[in-house]
Image: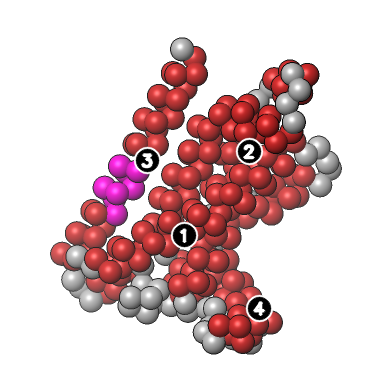
Amino acid sequence: MDWPAILLSAQLAAATLAVLLPLALFGARALARWQSPARPWVEGLLALPLVLPPTVIGYYLLVTMGGQSPLGQWFEALTGQTLAFSFTGLVVASVIFNIPFAVQPMQRAFEAIEPEVLEAAKCCGLTAWQSFVRIELPLAWPGILSAAVLTFAHTLGEFGVVLMVGGNIPGETQTVAIAIYDRVQAFDLGAAGAMSLALLLISLATIAVSYGLADRLMKARKG
């Protein structure tokens, strides 16, 4: 069992969630309220990671963050380290790749809130921020929880983008998915099977807990 790779995957998933969730929360709410002919194009752009091969996204991210790119050169001048083939680069790539998994569930949750509810809150004297915190967030909470779980679980098992952007550096960019691939390539099927089973159980438990909490929240709201 490659515990360093499992721990690195968990750290990557947690960092991705910490960065992406707040951004996706406000982005999803804005999309839910935005009425414009350009909205389908923006939604399509955000959903691209769902349909493009991970290697394609990984290639463009690698070009964008590589040592010859303006972003890569700026990051290296600022920190003395490369952005590609580093944990920071993995976090950036993971955030971009997981955008649809975070935005779409929350957007649908905000769209399900009836406009009359928001109008009533406004008539009661609540400011836009108070309405967001007291009304919208509690009503959209199941969608927010689903987005968090999907993002975390998807990051744990991501392979293509991680390999393209981070390479395969043990202890720094070698996640559990890459470690499993390495074990299979080395015909160490026992270790590959053990790590695959661990990842399967962790993902299943995470999703099951999410469904259970969402169900309890919905029953509590109806009660």
> Mark number for residue 176?
none
Q: How many marks?
A: 4
Where's residue 32, x and y in %?
70, 37
Question: In this view, which residue lies farthest toward the right?
Answer: 37
Specify start and end residues of the magenta stretch as a single range: 199-206
| Other residues around mark 2 within 10 Å, as few (<14) / some (14–19) / many (≥20) | many
Residue 138 percent coordinates (x, y):
56, 29
Instruction: Give amino acid for label 3.
Output: Ile
Residue found at the far left of this picture: 190
Q: Earlier in the sequence, mark 4 or mark 1?
A: 1
* Amino acid under disc 2: Gln
- Which residue is denoted by mark 1 in the rendering? 15
Q: Is residue 13 left or right of residue 183?
A: right
Indicate yes or no whether the magenta region holds residue 200. Answer: yes
In this figure, which residue is indicated by the disc labeled 2? 107
Picture coordinates of residue 96, whole percent (x, y): 58, 60
Cα distance in 3D space between marks 3 and 2? 20 Å
Question: Tag 4 or tag 2, which sits nearer the N-term?
Answer: 4
State the SS at label 3: helix
